Amino acid sequence: MEQLSPASTLTDAFHGLGISVWTEDWRAVGQAILALRAAGIDPVQHLATAPGELARLHATVQVTDVNNFTLELMGMPDKRMLIGSLAEVVPNSAQTFARWFAALARGDRFYRFESRVRRLDGSLRDCLVMARLPQDPEGLARLFVCVVDITGYKADQMRLTEAERAVDRALRASAMGLVTAAIAHEVNNPLAAVVTNAEAALRWLRRPNPDTVEAEAAIVAAIGDALRARDVVDRTRALLSNAPPRPVALDPHHAIRDAAQFVQRELRLAEATLRLEVMADTPRLLADPVQVQQILTNLLLNAAQALVAHDGLREIALRARPHAAGVLIEVADSGAGIPPDRLLRVFEPFYSTRTDGIGLGLAICRTAAEAQGGRIWVSGAPGSGACFHVLLPAAP
Amino acid sequence: MVPGIIAVVDDDEAIRVALRSLLRSMGHEVRLFADAFSFLAEATLRPPDCVLTDIQMPGMNGLDLQREIRRTMPGLPVIVITAFPEEAIRRQAMADGALCFLSKPFETAAILHWLAEALGERK
Ligand SMILES: Nc1ncnc2c1ncn2[C@@H]1O[C@H](COP(=O)(O)OP(=O)(O)OP(=O)(O)O)[C@@H](O)[C@H]1O
Ligand SMILES: [Mg+2]
């Protein structure tokens, strides 16, 4: 009996497994990293400021072989369509190249990221892309990249996320119901007392022998009740804007990064890219960290929601920069923007154009910004996206 | 309208004071109670002609008080007043035999109307 050699079993596996495998040549990239390091330059920082250089390096990567299943995954009839310059055979690999470069430059042992793969017919598949990154440049001549189709799994996950969000919304809505009930109760009581006292005063005065002492007492009581109704409204406002702010000195880098962390899921849903930028000389903020998070996450959520199903560029920029009156933080998106006549209205409580929106996000942002002694406003013509500006005090 | 003895049960002092003035201006005698228990303790000894009660009160709420009145003092008319009207609560109150269900702020004309009704029912 003929024995299968281990080598041929592996070759069978290479082609037979339901996993797409690519062999690629990344030598030129490895050499460029070594050269930059030898010159004392941080490769990642260098590339971040030289987009042309990134494109040039991308073009040097060669796909040398793919297994049979890769053709199935890509919906391509012939292997030859996938052999050659990575930039040419997989045009949208440009989006992930910076990530590959950074992983190699950092000396990561593994590359492991989710990506979207475009098939020949234009349809998209969600994939998990993995590779073990060799540490020596020669190993980079034959980099094995493994691509697993996780579209079905992602769809399940998405449904789960949707369900979670529905629960979130229900909780918020019921919290709103409770707040409304509390306000109604607290305001209607003094109001009823005002009306009743005023009526009583009238009746005391309209008697055949008017009783001015009783009437006066009722009027004095009515005034007290009206003032109480005002206090209730004031207190409710304080309650909704959360406890008194506890301002501390905040590093703008941290504030921005933490907020970005919070909205990863929504960014992925919207397939939006988020750019963070802190300009040089931006001072530290003097603000309550919880409220700053509240402001930034609400703005990022709105931006992500404005990009869901948006045709065209889906980008969000979160920037911090120095300002004469403190620190200016901006959240700008490439969505449809806000019509000029609504630039003020969007901050009103319960103003919402989204089917599942409550309309409290921006109202809370405004309360929180003002509680810090800051301001919030929005600019941006329709078509050029919305840009929200938050001005917060700087730490001394 | 024949003057009568009206009991007001409400945990809100402003409401009690205001109702006392209004009802007294009409010539009624008014007894104020801050909670259902103190009302029950006294009413069994000296029953009023009509009760105006709030719903949301600490301890025993207005609905429970109304049921207790039905049991121990049948025939005593109860007017229910609430600051947060909810349909389910209204239906419950009416099913338990409330004369009427008013929401705060209430109109004096409504109180007058139902008081006349309640006091007219007296034997
Ligand atoms: N980045 C944006 N681009 C376009 N429109 C926006 C943007 N941000 C807010 N809006 C508009 O402002 C409205 C109010 O926003 P707000 O955050 O207060 O409420 P919401 O997002 O609708 O609901 P929620 O209370 O759930 O946040 C939105 O419904 C939308 O019409
Ligand atoms: Mg919102």
Image (cartoon, coloured by chain):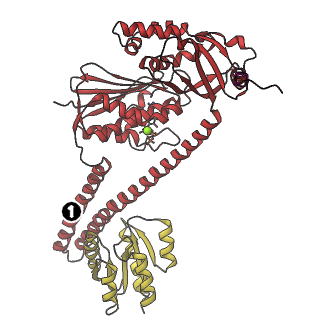
Chain colours: A red, B yellow
Q: Which residues are magenta?
A: A6-12
In the displayed structure, A336 sits above or below B52; it is above
Say which of B26 and B46 sits in front. Answer: B46
Residue A9, magenta (yes or no) = yes
In the displayed structure, A235 sits above or below B20; it is above
Name the main secondary structure of what is drawn in magenta.
helix
The N terminus of chain B appears in which quarter of the rendering? bottom left
Q: Residue farthest to the right?
A: A1
The C terminus of chain B appears in which quarter of the rendering? bottom left
For disc 1, the chain is A
Residue A77 percent across, percent down from the top left: 76, 16
How crowded is the residue under tag 1: few (<14 C-alpha within 10 Å), some, or many (20+)?
some
Residue A24, magenta (yes or no) = no
Q: For mark 1, give the secondary structure.
A: helix
Task: Report the side of A363 relative to A86 (left or right).
Answer: left
Residue B99 percent across, percent down from the top left: 46, 79
Say which of B96 and A74 sits in front. Answer: A74
Residue shown at the point (52%, 19%) measured from the top left: A96
Q: Quadrant of ligand 1?
A: top left
Residue B65 visible in this rendered orientation of the protein: yes
In the displayed structure, A103 sits above or below A199; it is above
Residue pointed to by mark 1: A224
Badge 1 amino acid: Gly
Residue A20 percent across, percent down from the top left: 66, 24
Residue B70 percent across, percent down from the top left: 45, 86
Residue shown at the point (24%, 20%) measured from the top left: A281
Say which of A126 and A35 sits in front. Answer: A35
Residue A202 sits in quarter: bottom left
Task: Report the side of A385 relative to A117 (left or right).
Answer: left
In the displayed structure, A148 sits above or below B22; it is above
